Amino acid sequence: MHEMALCEGVLGVVEDEARKQGFARVTAIVLEIGVLGHVAPEAMLFCFDAVSRGTIAEGAKLVIDRIAGAGWCLDCGKTVPLQERFGACPDCGQHHVQMTAGDELRVRELEVE
């Protein structure tokens, strides 16, 4: 389950920010997770609860915003929605699509005390 390692990384980011900005407790974390990133939101919620025990983020609410997949079709010259990695352009059917969104994993916001 790679979500455990991802949650440990998120916690590391939070702890780094706490040192830089001087806050003592995190009450909420908003993550952006792309739908094409092979990350299970339910597993992230479960793992975050486990890795945050005994830390400044213990008991914090983890909010997950899903980011839709998108890509730039080199043949059509426009942004198109993507339902899968390396998928075909839904307009022209070609596979010359460069993914531009949907594989993010980003801490967007922290609520702190």
Image: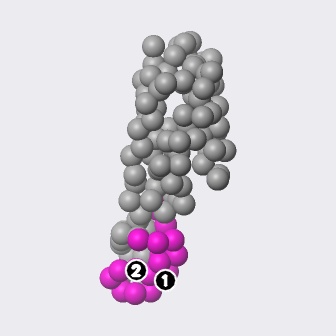
Residue 40 in the image, given as x and y percentages of width and height: 51, 54
Q: Residue at x 55, y 37 (%)?
A: 48
Residue 55 in the image, given as x and y percentages of width and height: 61, 22
Q: Secondary structure at mark 1?
A: loop
Q: Residues within 10 Å of mark 1 (few under 14, many from 20)?
A: some
**Contact between labelled residues 2 and 1, with CB atoms less than 8 Å apart:** yes
Does the rendering let one see residue 104? no
Q: Residues within 10 Å of mark 2 (few under 14, many from 20)?
A: many
The magenta segment: 83-102
> In the orientation shown, which residue stands out farthest toward the bottom?
93
Horizontal side of residue 82 vs 40, given as left or right: left
Mark 1 = which residue? 95
Residue 75 in the image, given as x and y percentages of width and height: 42, 82
Horizontal side of residue 45 vs 93, given as left or right: right
Does the rendering let one see residue 30? yes
Q: Residue at x 36, y 71 (%)?
A: 80
Name the amino acid, label 2.
Cys
Residue 54 in the image, given as x and y percentages of width and height: 63, 21
Confirm whether the magenta stretch covers residue 97.
yes
Q: Nearer the viewer, residue 108 or 100?
A: 108
Earlier sequence position, callout 1 versus callout 2: 2
The answer for how far apart the CA atoms under marks 1 and 2 are is 6 Å
Query: Residue 20, relative to residue 49: is it above or below?
Result: above
Q: Residue at x 58, y 41 (%)?
A: 47
Q: Main secondary structure of the magenta part?
A: loop
Mark 2 = which residue? 89
Name the amino acid, label 1.
His
